[in-house]
Amino acid sequence: MTHLAPNLLAFARLLRRAGLPIGSGEVMAAAGALSLIDIGEKREVQAALRAVMVHRHEHAEMFDAAFTIFWRDPEAGRHAAAMAMLDGLKPEEKHRPGSRRLAEAMARDRPPPPPKDSQEPPPLIDMAMTVSERERLNAMDFEAMSAAEIAYARAEIRKLKLPLDARRTRRFRPDPYGPRVDLRATLRRSLRTGGEIVTIARRRRVVRPPPLVAICDISGSMARYAQVLLHFLHAVTNDRDRVAAFLFGTRLTNITRQLKHRDAEASFEMIAHLVPDWSGGTRIGEALEKFNKDWSRRVLGQGAVVLLITDGLDRDGAAGLAEATERLKHSCRRLIWLNPLLRFSGFQPKSQGIRAMLPHVHEFRPVHNLNTLRELVEALSGRPA
């Protein structure tokens, strides 16, 4: 028991370095929770600590991995277990962000390497084929980023501006130099002068950017990308008006009101409590059908642009997916499908969901790093081809 408090503090520092928002309040709550359970039962300890230290769905996986490594053998974990997560993984699993951030967090406790002999000549570096750190991060996949790199990506995403191509609407506004004569306003003004027309009122058609609607997949295969893309949607929602955002896994959830909160962390905290199906299954066809039925008439007016963010992997075998996607296409001006699977050079639409949706979208784009997000902003800012 004498070592419990220092170990709990060390575990909290590890979680904080790995990217979890752990403060003194969480540590005190964790100490109180451990006093109410049998600390000899490892599962009870893990459940109690997770209940008071994890506030968002996407942090649960990181917490479980850190708990398994740290509380098994903290000293061995600092030196071997974390790095073995990277070295011993299969090639397709090497770049899981949770493993990499956790390995970096635990590696910080290792003693620094001894200084090299000062007489040793400095190494020669060939600068002919190197690239800057900024360029490397701009091209790095979100899934392969560490905690510090994701923080950089979020800061860059907040700088993105989305000046959508302005469109003519059906409304008019008074304008003394407008191209149209406003007869009704002219007659109304003439009543002030006894029916004599002194000036002619004119008007001009209102021009404004179209509504933007984002429908984002948060299933297990898309959860890591959705975490970063939510920062993009939050920045866009707070930068312009007429933005609607929806999340779907096994059900459709409207998060537009939550994203309007200026504080990003507070906004995501509200979303975490609102969305029950994060990192679960995917029912794309059912979600799009519900959107078409309940929301399309409310948010798809005046030439709306729709961003459909999903990998197209549907657990229902694409049942009703083609019909729902086609109806969505005809309800908006541009339907842009953003798929992180396009990051692979050899990508082919083999799954049933992708083949059902692909013929019914206007554009098919990748979204897996900062460069692809900037290309999306440029595409949305200009007229469609």
Image (cartoon, rainbow, N blue to C red):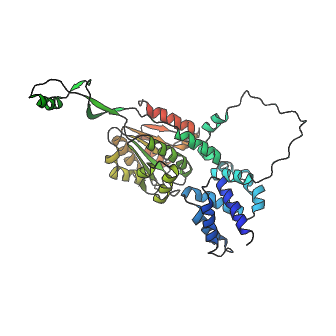
Task: Let me know if residue 71 appears in the view.
Answer: no
Q: Position of residue 206 (x, y in %)?
A: 30, 32
Task: Let me know if residue 42 appears in the view.
Answer: yes
- Position of residue 153 in the picture relative to residue 209 (left or right): right
In percent of the image, x 52 and y 52: which residue is there?
265
- Position of residue 75 in the picture relative to residue 206 (left or right): right
In the image as oriented, which residue stretches furthest toward the left?
Answer: 194
Q: Nearer the viewer, residue 26 or 290?
A: 26
In percent of the image, x 55 and y 60: which residue is there?
55
In the displayed structure, 197 sits above or below 161; it is above
Quadrant hosting residue 50 = bottom right
In the displayed structure, 297 sits above or below 176; it is below
Q: Position of residue 345 (x, y in %)?
A: 59, 38
Q: Position of residue 80 (x, y in %)?
A: 77, 56
In percent of the image, x 67 and y 73: which residue is there?
39
Q: Nearer the viewer, residue 225 or 316?
A: 225
